[in-house]
Amino acid sequence: MPKRVVYNNVFKWAFWAIEGNGPYGKIVKRMNIQQKLKQIEEQGLKRELIYLDRSGADVVHKGKRYLNFSSNDYLNFAADTRLKDNAKNSIDKWGIGATGSRLMSGSLEPHKRLEEKISQWLGYKSALVFGSGFLTNLGLISALCQANDIVLFDKLDHASLIDGIRMSGAKWKRYKHKNTNDLERLLEQYNNVQERIFIITDSVFSMDGDIAPVKEISKLAKKYNAILIVDEAHAIGIFGEKGAGICNEQKIKPDIITGTLSKALGSYGGFAVFSKEIEQLCVNKARSFIYSTALPAVCAATGEKAIDIIQEEKVLGEELLKKAKMFYGKIQKAGFDLLPFESQVIPVMIGDNDKTLKFTQALLEEELFVKAIRPPTVPKGTSRVRLSITLAHTKEELEKALEIIVRVGRGMGIIA
Ligand SMILES: Cc1ncc(COP(=O)(O)O)c(C=O)c1O
């Protein structure tokens, strides 16, 4: 055999082994996984699943009851009797699963009704329901943005937006959190350079609970002829007239709003509102819409009923924010490091990963169900305990939680 052929074969074999297709490659891969897990653990970043015996306003784990501060069920709808009865009727009529993707066999009457309701609620021509909020952002952005576009997005945008941007193949740049000067610097840089400019931001940021300056961002989008997408996942149902969100409250109309049924609406699923053309583009191009089983009818029917209740009762969001503000004031007075109050999401900033874990563990021992939020969910050095206030919390429960958080915080030297 000529030397060149031998060398080629050796090279190919080595490549095959290292790539992980051969027996040695598998060993290499296995070691990598173990090493990775060890590294995650050493950095204090290991995540574990806890299986609950009951979820809701309070959760039960191994027979012990905890007060839940880790839920996005902001309006306490997930166990609402009106919604449960409505869901039972929907299951009786439609069964459990949607049986196929929206295009194949899964576009059902409850989807249509929900889409009509959402588009009216938020004041847009069209709405489209997806399997989840994550799938909405992933599918919409990757269908809409292209390689010759530039996407400018907030540094703290949700992972689903970032993954959608990456999947689209568009060029992207992050601007400093909520910093419209930095955004304008990038808009100037790319104006007339890229085919289209997109700006993408959360309205309420999921881990900081603060609110994007959407009014100024919207002005900049107009000035530079950019397409604006706002993710209202944590604002829908709470802010704005009849819970229609931050954009409604601040009287702006982005090109697209995305949202979820899975937080304040107490159901599961995601949606986007936009023009009829963008809807058609998503139906034809959004891979997470086309190649995934449709949202079950029961989730759509629950979403629709939840919107009805929010529109009828009008003040649920106000009530929630009032409660959250009161709680925030007391935690702040105790000396904890907090960001300014803006929403029902209250992060207690700790910084160090291990300290955050220990604080969380101590609060769990005192029967408060809280979670440590660490990198990569939040930037390095900003680990925190994210307290999420819901309408389920009574005044007495909040007082009790406050007493525990202050006592544990003092005991650990987090506050003086
Ligand atoms: C800002 C934001 N967008 C989208 C999502 C995804 O929504 P869903 O939970 O419905 O997938 C989340 C979820 O945490 C979020 O915080």
Image: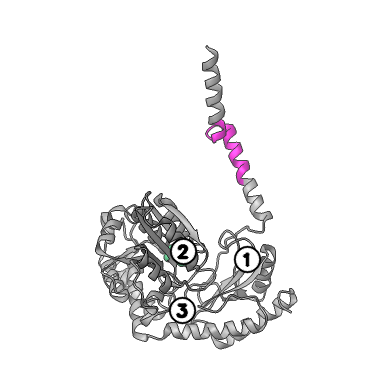
Q: Amino acid at mark 2?
A: Leu
Q: Residues within 10 Å of mark 1 (few under 14, many from 20)?
A: many
In the image, residue 236 lies at what x, y percent? 40, 74
Q: Nearer the viewer, mark 3 or mark 1?
A: 1
Q: Which residue is mark 2?
A: 183
Check the image and report above or below for 20 versus 60.
above
**Which of the image's four quarters has the C terminus?**
bottom right
User: Is residue 269 visible from the viewing direction of this image?
Assistant: no
Q: Amino acid at mark 1?
A: Ser
In the depicted view, which residue is nearer to us: 231 or 314?
Answer: 231
In the image, residue 252 lies at what x, y percent? 36, 74
Q: Is residue 100 left or right of residue 20?
A: left
The residue that appears at 45% across and 64% down in the rendered structure is 184
User: Which quadrant of the structure image shows residue 129?
Assistant: bottom left
Q: Residues within 10 Å of mark 2 (few under 14, many from 20)?
A: many
The segment highlighted magenta reads 17-33
Check the image and report above or below for 404 versus 277.
below
Q: Amino acid at mark 3?
A: Asn
The residue that appears at 62% across and 60% down in the rendered structure is 380
Q: Which residue is mark 1?
A: 383
Q: Is residue 28 left or right of residue 267?
A: right
User: Is residue 329 visible from the viewing direction of this image?
Assistant: yes
Spot the residue most to the top.
1
